[in-house]
Image (cartoon, rainbow, N blue to C red):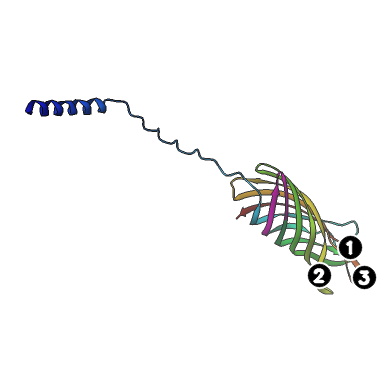
Amino acid sequence: MKKFLMAALMAGVATGAWAADLPTHKAPAAPMPAYVAPVFTWTGFYIGVNGGYGIGSASSSDFGNPSGGFVGGTAGYNYQMGQLVLGVESDFDWADLTKSGINAARPYSTTVDSLFTARARAGLALDRVLLYVTGGYAGADTNLNIPAFGSQSEWRSGGVIGAGLEYAFTNNISAKAEYLYAPLTSQTYDAQKSNVDLSLIRAGLNYKF
């Protein structure tokens, strides 16, 4: 009996050792998922800052053409469908467009103190590059000062059209450069006509949410 038990024990040990040497059949570890960067889109709300230079031009004006710099803020929204991007944008700028001279032997000073536009935009997206055209409403706060007769301020309204290019450095930050042409309504001061059309050249920096 002892010999039989000893033989069974030795057989069990040998079987365990042989099983330990068999190759395992565990499934390989699942590979780590590859990182896929999110697809860039122009869709979203944005705010920004802008600044540039404005040049007044008029076919008929008795008070010259004011010119100078401006700076302000921008807010808007874009929606992208394929490569087509549609949006709305508005901006308000503090301006210092001035012109001084002498008219009919009287000195005068014409200034544009602020600018506002509210526009639609339509563009073609080439990944992070956006080419667009824009148009809508433009307004400007103007002031005419004639020392012998005092001063008069007027808010002039008109239309605006333009085009530009915007580039997105990141998914949230973009920079743009654009040109806007804004013909404004004319005003008459002391039987003399003041007519100003503005050409605005500006750059801007936007943050998209």
Residue 194's x, y, as percent? 87, 64
Q: Which residue is mark 2?
A: 154
Q: Earlier in the sequence, mark 3 or mark 2?
A: 2
Relative to 133, say whether 62 is above or below: below
Q: Could you classify mark 2 by the number of other residues whose Cα lies within 10 Å: few (under 14), some (14-19), or many (20 or more)?
A: few
What range of the chain is rendered magenta? 73-87
Relative to 14, say whether 94 is above or below: below
Q: Which residue is mark 1?
A: 62
Q: Residue 66: which quarter of the image?
A: bottom right
Q: Which residue is mark 3?
A: 191
Q: Residue at x 78, y 64 (%)?
A: 140
Residue 74 magenta: yes
Left or right position of 175 against 192: left
Left or right position of 157 against 32: right
Residue 195 magenta: no
Left or right position of 104 against 69: right
Q: Could you tell me which secondary element the residue under label 1 belongs to? A: loop
Q: Could you classify mark 3 by the number of other residues whose Cα lies within 10 Å: few (under 14), some (14-19), or many (20 or more)?
A: few
Q: Nearer the viewer, residue 52 or 77?
A: 77
Q: Residue 27: which quarter of the image?
A: top left
